Image (spheres, helix red, strand yellow):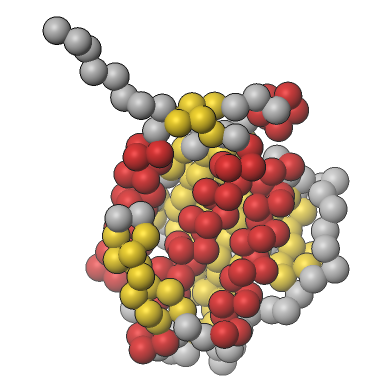
Amino acid sequence: MASRTATKDIITLRGSAAIVSEFFGYAANSILYNRGVYPEESFAKVKKYGLPMLLTQDEGVKSFLSNLTAQLSEWLESGKLQRVVLVIMSKATGEVLERWNFSIETDKEVVEKGVTREKSDKEIMREIQAIMRQIASSITYLPCLDEPCVFDVLAYTDTDVAVPFTWIESDPKLIANPQMVKLHSFDTKIHKWLKSSGHVHFHQLKIFNLLSGYPD
């Protein structure tokens, strides 16, 4: 009787960077929708990762996220990106209400030697599906945001990273005495995406945010 083996797909550094940066775009949209940062009617339903997803139709937010994911992809390819944080703040006071921390571990051998890794596309998609479902269920365990909010995105990079003029060095926008909720992770075998909502302290990294700021 013939044995059955799982099909593995070749993952390159550029391909992994594209997977991870695209994932963040969809995750950010899901967070903004599920946390009520923008009106429900400003999102449109699409199919992605085998799931119904919601994408903003606001041109300002779309442009912001498009520029963001393009830069994240470049930093991921260079192995210089350590963490991305989506911050939700009070529109009236600027108080930080939530920090969605996305920590990234990169296979340095792939960056330095250009080797590839193997992992099934279906396996990666299943891991991403688990994260997206957890974001969608966040309204059941996170406190209600009962005031108008805005968002910003911070990128934690190596100190020697080349930074475009559209980004500026930023403070970490911390939360005093935070409560933390750990969520699922996914792994392309090149980039491992570890995720939690809350606050984590960092050292010896530069922190930047997009100069255009967060859309109102």
Locate the C terminus and report the quarter of the image it occupies. bottom right
Residue 63 visible: yes
| 63 on left or right of 142 | right
Identify the residue at horizontal 39%, vertical 76% (top origin): 33
Which residue occupies the foreground of this view, 130 or 37?
130
Toward which corner of the image does residue 163 lie, by quadrant? Answer: bottom right
| Closest to the observer, 206 or 74 | 74
Work out whether 208 lies above or below 64: above
* Residue drawn at the location 54% of the way across and 34% of the way down: 11
Q: How many marks?
A: 0
Residue 98 vs 16, above or below: the answer is below
| Residue ranking furthest to the front | 2
Q: Please give the name of the residue rendered at 69% of the width and 43% of the height, measured from the top-left corner.
A: 77
Q: Residue at 52% x, 74% y: name it.
A: 88
Check the picture and name the quadrant holding the N terminus.
top left
Q: Where is residue 13 in the image (x, y as percent from the top left)?
A: 63, 37
* Quarter location, residue 78: top right
In this rendering, is residue 171 above or below 184?
A: below
- Left or right, 171 with respect to 132, comes to right
Is residue 199 visible in the rendered structure shown here?
no
The spot of residue 210 in percent (x, y) is: 72, 70
Q: Tell me residue 104's x, y (percent).
A: 58, 44
Q: In this view, does 40 lie above or below 14?
A: below
Residue 45's x, y, as percent?
34, 75
Residue placed farthest to the left in the image?
Answer: 1
